[in-house]
Amino acid sequence: MSKQLLACVMVVTAATSALAWRASAPDTHGVAVTNRPAERRVDISIDGQPFTSYIYPQSFEKPVLYPIRSAAGLLITRGYPLDPRPGERADHPHHVGHWFNYGDVNGYDFWGNSSETAANLKPKTGVIVQKSITRAAGGEKSGELSVTADWVIPDGSVLLREQTRFVFAGAPGVRTIDRTTTWTAGDKALTFNDTKEGAFGIRVARSLDSPVQQRDSFVGADGKRGPARADDNVGVTGRYLGSDGKAGDAVWGTTGPWMSLSGSVDGKPVTIAILNHPSSTNYPTYWHARGYGLFAANPVGRHAYDPTQPERVLTLEPGKSATFRFRILIRDAKLGRDDLEKEQSAFAREK
């Protein structure tokens, strides 16, 4: 997306969100899933309160869920680059809300592609193009959104076809997003090479970062990206916890069925957890979880995280598929290991 288009998207997103929610989120019980094809978005609300939106502007490099809120209405995703908030890191413009892609598919980078990708790198990048909404239905206890998309490289070829089913649910203090995604190779064999750049990602709000010692650019009071400076870590509260008991920075490159990130947003407690279902390809996943706010699971790469392990290459012959299943759990509380083990066990029992 060009910087001019990005600016337009930011303005349109900010200007239309409130109107869209007033129209799509009546004061009622249950989960509403409202398809807005003219706006290239689907809005999800629970008990009349906004939860998230599936957005796919033509200028985007991939569809994303953005923003994502807790049951208490806390914004748990970063605003930058769509809606920059003062104090946020102004880095990695390809980290938007929640997404699922990969950094090396037949040598093409779908993970790192953004409006700021250098022109000389663009020929080796790919985009995920939204094709259809096959189901958008609300319900008393859950709502469903099913979509299809094509992974396209610069010459217009479709490397793979994606089918994704989201299930959105909630209760007091709880929100969940279940995502089941199937990648099917087109008319050529696909090789997903071993890289850390993937795959099931969330970029979290600034207060859910954890303390790191690095220089970055940050959004200033004027909403613009400022010069690089050392991170002062003011207001950051996040702490990762892995299923193996490791915590903080030690979780990066580990493997396991779940990981959580706990902290506070606007002074209120919140936990985000990613759960991996046993039916998912290459279960249990590796974790690409960084203190600067990237919370990601990578079920494809291995050697890039643990050099003692051999490279893992996922190969799909023409017409063959791989399916991945994850849950994003958001609780307005700080959850401990026992709580998360129960959540994972319940998810694992689901068919």
Image (spheres, rainbow, N blue to C red):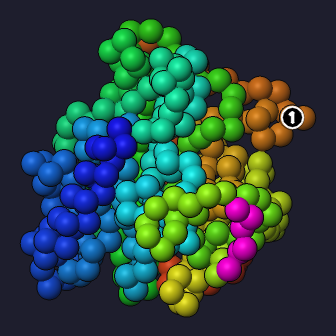
Is residue 26 visible in this depiction of the protein?
yes
The count of marks equals 1
Q: Residues in magenta?
A: 229-234
Residue farthest to the bottom, as pictured: 267
Residue at the spot 57% in from the left edge and 32% down from the top edge: 103
Give the percent coordinates (x, y) of residue 264. 58, 83
Is residue 340 visible in this depiction of the protein?
no
Residue 330: say if magenta.
no
Within-10-Å neighbours for mark 1: few <14, some 14–19, many 20+: few
Q: Is residue 281 left or right of residue 19?
A: right
Residue at the spot 21% in from the left edge and 58% down from the top edge: 12
Give the percent coordinates (x, y) of residue 82. 37, 57
Q: Which residue is mark 1?
A: 307
Q: Quadrant of the N terminus?
A: top left
Q: Is residue 69 left or right of residue 34?
A: right
State whether residue 116 is above or below residue 137. Answer: above
Residue at the spot 78% in from the left edge and 41% down from the top edge: 305
